Image (cartoon, helix red, strand yellow):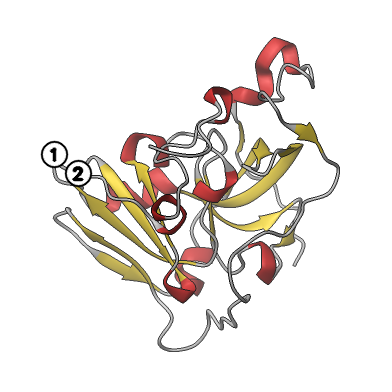
C-alpha cells in the first residue's frame, strides 16, 4: 500500500554524521548495499493482523497495560523515520524511510513504573529480543508497517516491525506481537545464541556479552 500523505519526518542522528557523508555513516567492518537482504531464523509466519485474535500487547512493569487491534495501530498518527540499517552480517543500507507509530507514544500510554528499565519485544514464532527502554523509545524508534512508501513484505516483518536504527538490525524485531516492560534485562533469542546484549554497530558489539 502506498501512502503519499504528508507526515512528520524524523531524521535519525547517525544519518547526519560528517554532513551525511556515506563513509562516515558506515560503521566499522560494514559494506554498503543497495539491496535489503532477507535474513531470519525459521519460516516466515503467516499472519493475518485483521483476525479477531490478533492483538499488540504492551504489558509488564507498567500501571496501564493494554492491547491494540491492528486497525487501531494503523489509525494512529504516523511518522516517517529516515535512517540507515546495519546488519550484524556486515552489510549496511543507507537512506531508508520507514513509516509507523513512535514507540515512545505506545510505551508512555502504558505508564511504565519507575523500575522499568528494559523491554523484551515478542514476535511471532516465539522470537524475542531485548533492549534498554531508553534505546527502544528514542525519537527515531517506531513500530513500522511501511518501508519507502509501501507496506513491508512479510519476510521483512509485516505487519509490524520494530525499528531501532542505532543498533544492529536484529534488535529491530520482526512480526511484533508484544512489548514487555521489565525491571531487569534478559537475553532474547539471538542473545541466547551468542549475540551481544546491546548491539551497537559503532562499537562492533556483534557477539558475546
Closer-to-camera residue (179/73): 179
Closer-to-camera residue (122/83): 122
Which residue is the site of mark 2? 116
Q: As drawn, is 42 to the left or to the right of 57?
A: right
> Which residue is depicted at the point 47% across and 34% down?
139
Q: Say which quadrant the C terminus sits in.
A: top left
Q: As drawn, is 36 to the left or to the right of 173?
A: right
Q: Number of marks in the image?
A: 2
Q: Which mark is residue 37?
A: none
> Which residue is depicted at the point 49% across and 39% down?
207
**Residue, far top:** 18
Q: Quadrant of residue 28?
A: top right
Residue 107 image point, x, y percent: 32, 49
Residue 42 image point, x, y percent: 59, 73
Pointer 2 with pointer 1, Cβ within 8 A: yes
Q: Which mark is residue 114?
A: 1
Q: CA distance from mark 2 to mark 1?
A: 6 Å
- Classify 10 Å Cα crowding around label 2: few (below 14), some (14-19), many (20 and above): some
Residue 190 image point, x, y percent: 47, 54
- Secondary structure beneath dot 2 equals loop
Q: As drawn, is 136 to the left or to the right of 45?
A: left
Q: Say which quadrant the N terminus sits in.
A: bottom right
Residue 203 image point, x, y percent: 53, 23
Amino acid at each position: 500500500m502506498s501512502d503519499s500523505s504528508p507526515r512528520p519526518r524524523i531524521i535519525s542522528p547517525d544519518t547526519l554524521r560528517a554532513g551525511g557523508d556515506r563513509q562516515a555513516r558506515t560503521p566499522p567492518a560494514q559494506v554498503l548495499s543497495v539491496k535489503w537482504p532477507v535474513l531470519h531464523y525459521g519460516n516466515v509466519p503467516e499472519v493475518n493482523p485483521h483476525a479477531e485474535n490478533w492483538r499488540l500487547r504492551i504489558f509488564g512493569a507498567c500501571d496501564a497495560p493494554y492491547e491494540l487491534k491492528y486497525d487501531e495501530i494503523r489509525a494512529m498518527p504516523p511518522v516517517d523515520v529516515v535512517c540507515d540499517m546495519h546488519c550484524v552480517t556486515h552489510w549496511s543500507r543507507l537512506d531508508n524511510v520507514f513509516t509507523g507509530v513512535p514507540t515512545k507514544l505506545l510505551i508512555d500510554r502504558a505508564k511504565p513504573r519507575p523500575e522499568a528499565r528494559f523491554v523484551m519485544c515478542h514476535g511471532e514464532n516465539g522470537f524475542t529480543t531485548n533492549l534498554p527502554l531508553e534505546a527502544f523509545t528514542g525519537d527515531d524508534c517506531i513500530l513500522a508497517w511501511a518501508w519507502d512508501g509501501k507496506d513491508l513484505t512479510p519476510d521483512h516483518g509485516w505487519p509490524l516491525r520494530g525499528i531501532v536504527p542505532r543498533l544492529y538490525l536484529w534488535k529491530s524485531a520482526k512480526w511484533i506481537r508484544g512489548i514487555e516492560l521489565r525491571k531487569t534485562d534478559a537475553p532474547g533469542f539471538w542473545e541466547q545464541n551468542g549475540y551481544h546484549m546491546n548491539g551497537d554497530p559503532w562499537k562492533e558489539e556483534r557477539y558475546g556479552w
